[in-house]
Image (tube, grey):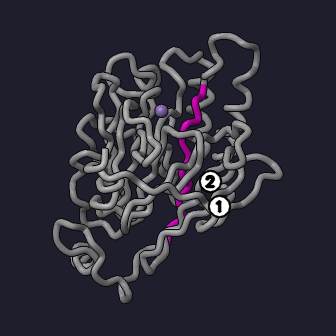
């Protein structure tokens, strides 16, 4: 039944929407954050890490206040694998406090594989609500109760030419299909020597309803065809006017995906979907 519902929305390998006027999907609210960088200051410098921890606690508070159905952390949750024990304990207790499904897509700072920060504590035991996407070739986390799946490919820090979305498989049979990835969206002013390239055409062809991006401190939407895709920006504001927000992703029953940037600092501004800056991509043939 679910399968036929999705078949009616998407046809063929292109993943293009053909008709969605009569299709009802479950309405969901997701909180998307990234680049938390817990433990960035653990090596010294007094209590500079307090701001990072406070920002993540604000994300947790927001998820609870918004009664979110799910939380996505799009990489660089930890700053490095040598963070202090206190930082691991803080992270585990805050993740558990979210008390709803939470998906972590590892980034370059919190990669999986050898010397991974995630091998230093038992996530499944400390916070059973958390799913870590460990698959080097990508893996899909399924949430049948939400009629939703999320695909992501983990950073391992072993591949210099890692491409988060290259060869992303077709969406499955759930009503909502999302993806998470950590890297550089390639736009006309992009520095191409950076690694972890993300192409507009990959996102557009992904067939996903929403792609949660991480790696950039700046919050921005990116051009991605019929797919909605955005960077939440770092959770700790770094002085920029768009810093210190998390994205609320509203998946509506008619298929619409609407973003709202919610401030993590007192006095911060709420930014509605159309006012969130959007970046055009550069096609692979122009690179
Ligand atoms: Mn990163």
User: Could you tell me which residue is drawn at 46 percent across and 74 percent down?
Assistant: 256
The x and y percentages for residue 193 are 37, 30
Say whether marks 1 and 2 touch (CB < 8 Å): yes
Regarding residue 141, the answer to whether it shows in the image is no
| Residue range highlighted in magenta | 27-38
For the C terminus, the image quarter is top left
The residue under label 2 is 63
Query: Which residue occupies the foreground of this view, 279 or 145?
Result: 279
The residue under label 1 is 66
Specify whether 151 is left or right of 129. left
**Quadrant position of residue 171:** bottom left
Q: Look at the picture and state if 222 lies above or below 183.
A: below
Q: Look at the picture and state if 116 lies above or below 185.
A: above
Element type where label 2 sits in the image = helix
Q: Was residue 32 drawn as part of the magenta stretch in this picture?
A: yes
Density class for disc 2 (Cα within 10 Å; few <14, some 14-19, many ≥20) is: many
Q: Look at the picture and state if 20 lies above or below 163.
A: below
Separation of residues labelled 1 and 2 (CA atoms):
5 Å
The x and y percentages for residue 98 are 59, 47
The x and y percentages for residue 14 are 21, 67
The x and y percentages for residue 52 are 67, 32
Outermost residue toward the front? 286
């Amino acid at each position: 039944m679910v399968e036929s519902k999705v078949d009616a929305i998407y046809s063929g390998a292109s993943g293009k929407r053909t008709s969605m006027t009569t299709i009802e999907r479950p309405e969901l609210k997701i909180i998307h954050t990234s680049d938390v960088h817990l433990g960035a200051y653990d090596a010294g410098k007094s209590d500079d890490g307090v701001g990072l921890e406070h920002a993540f606690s604000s994300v947790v508070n927001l998820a609870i206040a918004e009664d979110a159905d799910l939380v996505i952390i799009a990489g660089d949750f930890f700053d490095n694998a040598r963070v202090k024990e206190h930082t691991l304990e803080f992270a585990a207790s805050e993740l558990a406090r979210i008390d709803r499904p939470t998906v972590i897509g590892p980034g370059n700072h919190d990669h999986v594989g050898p010397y991974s920060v995630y091998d230093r504590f038992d996530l499944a035991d400390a916070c059973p609500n958390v799913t870590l996407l460990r698959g080097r070739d990508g893996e899909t986390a399924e949430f049948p109760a939400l009629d939703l799946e999320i695909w992501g490919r983990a950073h391992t820090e072993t591949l210099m030419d890692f491409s988060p979305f290259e060869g992303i498989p077709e969406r499955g049979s759930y009503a909502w299909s999302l993806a998470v990835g950590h890297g550089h969206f390639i736009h006309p002013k992009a520095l191409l020597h950076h690694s972890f390239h993300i192409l507009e055409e990959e996102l557009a062809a992904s067939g996903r309803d929403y792609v949660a991006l991480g790696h950039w401190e700046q919050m921005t939407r990116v051009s991605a065809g019929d797919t909605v895709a955005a960077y939440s920006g770092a959770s700790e504001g770094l002085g920029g006017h768009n810093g210190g927000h998390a994205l609320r992703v509203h998946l509506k029953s008619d298929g619409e995906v609407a973003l709202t940037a919610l401030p993590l600092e007192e006095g911060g501004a709420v930014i509605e979907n159309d006012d969130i800056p959007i970046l055009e991509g550069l096609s692979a043939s122009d690179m």
